Image (tube, rainbow, N blue to C red):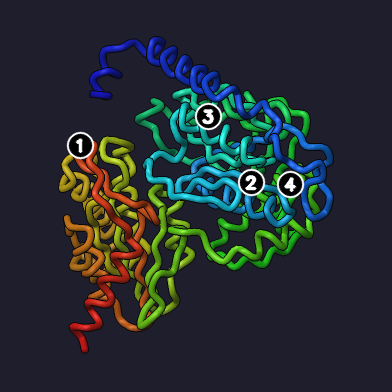
Amino acid sequence: MKDLIKKFIPEWLLNLYHLILAFLGALVYRFPSRLRPPFAKASAGKQGYGGQAKKLKVIGVTGTNGKTTVVEMISKIFEETGYKVALVNSIRFKIGKKEWPNELRMTMPGRFKLQKFLRQAVDSGCQYAVLEVTSEGIKQYRHKFIDFNVAVFTNLTPEHIEVHGSFEKYREAKGKLFQATKNIHIINIDDENAEYFLKFAAKKKYTYGLSQGDINNKNLQLNLQLLGGFNIYNALAAIGVGLSQEISLETCKSAVEKIEGIPGRMEEVISQPFKVFVDYAFTPNALEKVYQTLKPQNKKMICVLGSCGGGRDKWKRPVLGELAAKYCDKVIVTNEDPYNEDPIEIIDQVANGALKEIRVNPRSYPRKSASIYKILDRREAIRKSLELAKPGDIVIITGKGCEPSICVTGGKKIPWDDREVAREEIKRLSKLRD
């Protein structure tokens, strides 16, 4: 039905529809991002930051990868300082100490849900709300009528191209958050698109990078508990936000270094007799970084993957397959949110990319022609990966992270959790071997 509506209704009319919904959502909930928290203390935070209670400050985090983790890190910094914080990301909703899972399968909620959430944050006395902001959300004006105090840019690689029409339009959508945010911008200076985001006007700008920028790892020396060099960037982004709010560098650093893990992000779900990780990565850039981080020396890596979001970004399916074959010793391609598309066709497209990589580099992969498996049932695919693994090997299951469902035809959602399935299957396998 949605596809038919998009096909026959002019784009300008759809845009007007989305804009009106955004205005009505803000109107119904009385423009919550412009109001003061009624119960906020006059002096907020352990260190006395904040002064007199001010209106709710909203922080928006956008980019291709890392948004969820950055939102979690920013929240941790504020909480460490003593602020009451609300957050929305692809994992959860949180207002103060109350939290509940994000089961919408929408990283950025719709206009009414988002404005209602901000109203609840204000009414509960939150001083900050940290939001994950997506390009599709911006395209549908979900960011409108929200007064963003800070905009954060993580990175940009090709994604959602079929939705936006081109990479340039995808980038332009992200840029609209910075265009709307006039106060503070936090920008990854190492990203090749940094100059585009730096051109937007703001009262203050903070840049970050591994060895350059206002906040950089060379001078900071972070000791994170999270795996992956990419998490250094995520931490620097969060620290930039903290510094912009006059929180000390020591407090920011301490907060991010205390984080032991993010659900579904490089999450180790099995430790023995081999390690099994679950990660959300479904873009080529994110997937390659995960593989590079986990690839063991002189050990085998077995990967389970699909292609997230049937009907979207078909170009990346063979690319994901190529990356899997490049880094993994055994590749299992399976089903993963096909929506209304034929899941077998999606699997074939990913697997063909893996086979192409093997053909192009036969000397590097002399035995891998027999190591590409196509298994429709995702549970069976995870079971196969565990059966193939030997002590010391690495199994990595990507694409869904901690998502609570698989989306299939007709809008139906099948309850699911890669982490729980992996744990269930290792128990079953252990019993059979005993």
Q: Which residue is mark 3?
A: 115
Q: Nearer the viewer, mark 1 or mark 2?
A: 2
* In the image: residue 216, left or right of residue 333: right
Q: Residue at x 63, y 32 (%)?
A: 197
Of the residues under marks 2 and 3, which one precedes in the sequence?
A: 2
The reply to whether callout 1 and callout 2 are in contact (CB within 8 Å) is: no
Q: Nearer the viewer, residue 221 or 203?
A: 203
The three-letter amino acid code for the residue at tag 3 is Gln
Indicate the secondary structure of the residue bearing disc 2.
strand
Of the residues under marks 3 and 1, which one precedes in the sequence?
A: 3
Q: Which residue is mark 2?
A: 85
Of the residues under marks 1 and 2, which one precedes in the sequence?
A: 2
- Dividing the picture into quarters, in which one does residue 218 lie? bottom right
Q: Is residue 46 above or below residue 123?
A: below
Q: Residue at x 21, y 89 (%)?
A: 434
Q: Position of residue 424 (x, y in %)?
A: 27, 71
Q: Is residue 269 above or below residue 72?
A: below
Indicate the secondary structure of the residue bearing disc 4.
loop
The three-letter amino acid code for the residue at tag 1 is Asn
- Dividing the picture into quarters, in which one does residue 384 lie? bottom left
* Residue 364 visible in the current orientation: no
Q: Which residue is mark 4?
A: 213
Q: Is residue 238 above or below residue 104?
A: below
Of the residues under marks 2 and 4, which one precedes in the sequence?
A: 2
Q: Label 2 neighbourhood size at 10 Å, few (<14), some (14-19), many (20+)?
A: many
Q: Residue at x 71, y 39 (%)?
A: 39
Using the numbered discs, state the Cα–Cα distance from disc 3 to disc 1 in whole angstroms.
30 Å
Using the numbered discs, state the Cα–Cα distance from disc 4 to disc 1 in whole angstroms.
45 Å
Q: Which residue is mark 1?
A: 340
The three-letter amino acid code for the residue at tag 4 is Gly
The three-letter amino acid code for the residue at tag 2 is Val
Using the numbered discs, state the Cα–Cα distance from disc 1 to disc 2 in whole angstroms.
38 Å
